[in-house]
Amino acid sequence: MATETLTIGKALNLGLRKAMEDDAKVLLMGEDIGKLGGVFRITDGLQKDFGEARVVDTPLAEAGILGTAVGLAMRGYRPVCEIQFDGFVFPAYNQIVTQVAKMHARSRGKLPMPVVIRIPFGGGIGAVEHHSESPEAYFAHTAGLKVVAVSNPVDAYWGIQQAIACPDPIVFLEPKRRYWEKAEVDLDATADPLFASRVVRGGDDVTVLAYGPMVKTALQAAEAAAEEGRSLEVVDLRTVSPLDLEPVFESVRRTGRCVVVHEAPVTLGLGAEIAARVTETCFHSLEAPVLRVGGYDTPYPPSKLEEEYLPDLDRVLDAVDRSMGF
């Protein structure tokens, strides 16, 4: 059994390497991903080993990167596009939602679009404007796109390979402030399904849902709650489109309470959709309204204020207290 202790960043690197070894049609595209290895070094060493034709340093032109990816996918390639920072994706938004997401339906199934769009997302690294966005709701709202948000090295290693092998376009969100989190990864294991949520901590009092960078925060809140005699069940959604909510419904029917946590602003965020569906399906089991914890309805603030902006353990516990108070 080949088990290694990996960071999320290294797990992604090894996952990309394995996908490229397994399929010569896989190629990587992005700004500074070749010689530099990407600003977070996720693609470090891949251009050296696979060559400039398969690990392509592109111009600073996100719309061009995605437009090129569409043509490559139509010719049978599997392009993996890196968007250097989350806030840089918007120049490519038109290509993603009008071409990448629609081509399969537009061609009546004749043209699959196996494009992976890797996006480091979320805050917590003290970056300047346009470097700390949470754009997942834009893409989850778009029919034809799948949206994955990993939270740990195991899912990073297997998830990037599964995303590349998928015939559908996938926005693959990587929690940039968690890139250096470590865990044991069994490189010979059988991977969990990509589009499935997972209970990562059992509990009986409140169901707490999170994805990406907020999973660690939810687990920290569960640890703190346990010291006060409360038992929180934490579910890592893992994929935000499609949502796998059956494990969530099962949990909420047992706990009777639900709190949804994400970094993105609360208004019209993923938490709103999840709260509606949990309420519709589990209404008679609920002991309290489904509560949401998220960023504020403001542009992402300067780095000196981001700790006030980002949901933290205390804000999650406050929501738990309010839920238990009903």
Image (cartoon, rainbow, N blue to C red):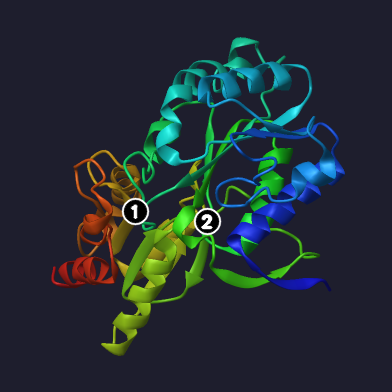
Residue 242 shows up from this direction: yes
Q: Name the residue under label 1.
A: 262
Q: Is residue 104 above or below residue 178?
A: above
Farthest residue toward the top? 107
What amino acid does circle 1 point to? His
Side of 75 relative to 118 (left or right):
right
Q: Is residue 98 above or below residue 300?
A: above
Q: Nearer the viewer, residue 171 or 287?
A: 171
Looking at the rendered image, the quarter that the N terminus falls into is: bottom right
Q: Mark 2 points at which residue?
A: 197
Looking at the rendered image, the quarter that the C terminus falls into is: bottom left
| Residues packed near mark 2 inside 10 Å, few (<14), some (14 to 19) or many (20 plus) | many
Q: Which of 318 and 71 is in front in this view?
A: 71
Helix, strand or loop under label 2: loop
Helix, strand or loop under label 1: strand
Q: Which of marks 1 and 2 is nearer the N terminus?
A: 2
